[in-house]
Amino acid sequence: MIDAPKQLDEYELGDLLGSGGMAQVYHATDLRLQRPAAVKLINPALRNTESYRNRFEHEARAVAQLNHPNIVQVYRYGEADDLLYMAMQFVEGQHLGDLLAEQVKSENYLSLDDVVSIVEQVCAALDYAHQHGVFHRDIKPSNIIQTPDGRIVLVDFGLALLSEVGTLGEALGTPTYLAPEQAMSSQNVVAQSDLYALGVIVFQLLTHRLPFPAVEEPLDMVLHHLETEPYLVRRFRPNLTPSIEQAVNKLLAKRPQDRYASGADFANAFSAAVHASPLVRHLELAAVNIRADAQMAATQLGQFTDSKVRPALTEVGSKLREGLFQFDDVMVQKIVPTVQAHLTRLRDPAQRGDVLPYWLGGLVVILLLLLAWAVLA
Ligand SMILES: Nc1ncnc2c1ncn2[C@@H]1O[C@H](COP(=O)(O)OP(=O)(O)OP(=O)(O)O)[C@@H](O)[C@H]1O
Ligand SMILES: [Mg+2]
């Protein structure tokens, strides 16, 4: 712990808000302007190298240029009493780490609308910073604060860069949110590295779990990021649709170029998946269930032991599997987007003139589905 003075320049320090790997954050009062602030004291052990100071100043300038409702406003970086500190807007609220812990404890999932709201605001902040050449580098729940009225504010922009002069262990901390390319080298950081970290958080918000098996050693988590295929959301929340799952999974791709190009792209895809009409959601889930049922039926048919009927049953099984897989793919690739498009048109008053054919089309699709169910059941 740093021994904090009572005052740093014009900032009178108050209660300790919390402390992390390399710093302590205090509630403070700006005595000149008579307004609240938060002051982050940086571990003095880190400040003595030239490269650290250069980075600190470079990063301070970059972050000071950012002016966005979802990014904490930095008042000043200073040096006083032999301490480096950053004074910033005090954000009242709860960080997502605490929010998640509460949700996990009460076994209560955050509503999908709330997750969308968090995603949209974090993505807006990230896109804005990335467009200004600043990467966050340390997106994690404790750096995302939610105010009582639901606004999201990101803190600690660019500060992760400063901890890299410490040892590797220090720099990594708990690498729960570390993108694979960032784990290889901090030089590799791109906009998509911040998005990957957000992907891990969204996965946690949706499932109350990490997308990888639990580990004891931090290094094993790094290996998971590098090598293990992440869990899929529906493994833990089977009633969420495949589109929601796919959007999150895409953010967790190993290669940055396989993720979304921007935060907005992810936010749009995620929000569209969450807000898809009930009909589309049912169709998506029906497709998955049909596939699972077909697979089970085919397996059971294949397990029949009577040697006379077995070949025939095995063949029926594989036909079933083949046919239903095709049906499933056709449904997901063609029917779902078509129904979605029709519903969108139906909602557009300018196009209501030709409503009838679409309703009929929808009806035919539903009848076909019922037929498929009946045949299967
Ligand atoms: N501007 C701010 N207003 C209010 N609380 C803040 C502000 N900045 C940070 N905090 C809170 O202060 C606490 C300590 O932050 P700090 O960044 O030192 O630790 P951390 O984010 O948990 O870990 P790390 O040091 O790895 O970033 C956190 O709970 C954080 O949410
Ligand atoms: Mg922090």
Image (cartoon, helix red, strand yellow):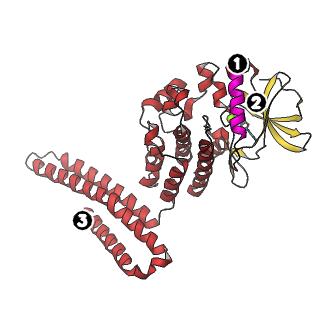
**Disc 2 beta carbon < 8 A from ligand 1?**
yes
Residue assigned mark 1: 50
Q: Quick one: label 3, few (<14), some, or many (20+) residues within 10 Å?
A: few
In the displayed structure, 118 sits above or below 78; it is: below
* The magenta stretch spans residue 57: yes
Find out whether residue 369 is within the magenta segment. no
Position of 207 relative to 343 (above/below): above
Q: Distance of mark 1 from mark 3, alpha carbons? A: 74 Å
Quarter in which the N terminus is drawn: top right
Q: Amino acid at mark 1?
A: Glu
Circles 1 and 3: CB atoms closer than 8 Å:
no
Specify the segment rendered in magenta.
52-72
Query: 56 and 226: which one is in front?
Result: 56
User: Which residue is labeled 3 in the image?
Assistant: 375
Q: Could you say whether the residue bearing mark 3 is in a helix, strand or loop?
A: helix
Which structural element holds mark 2?
strand
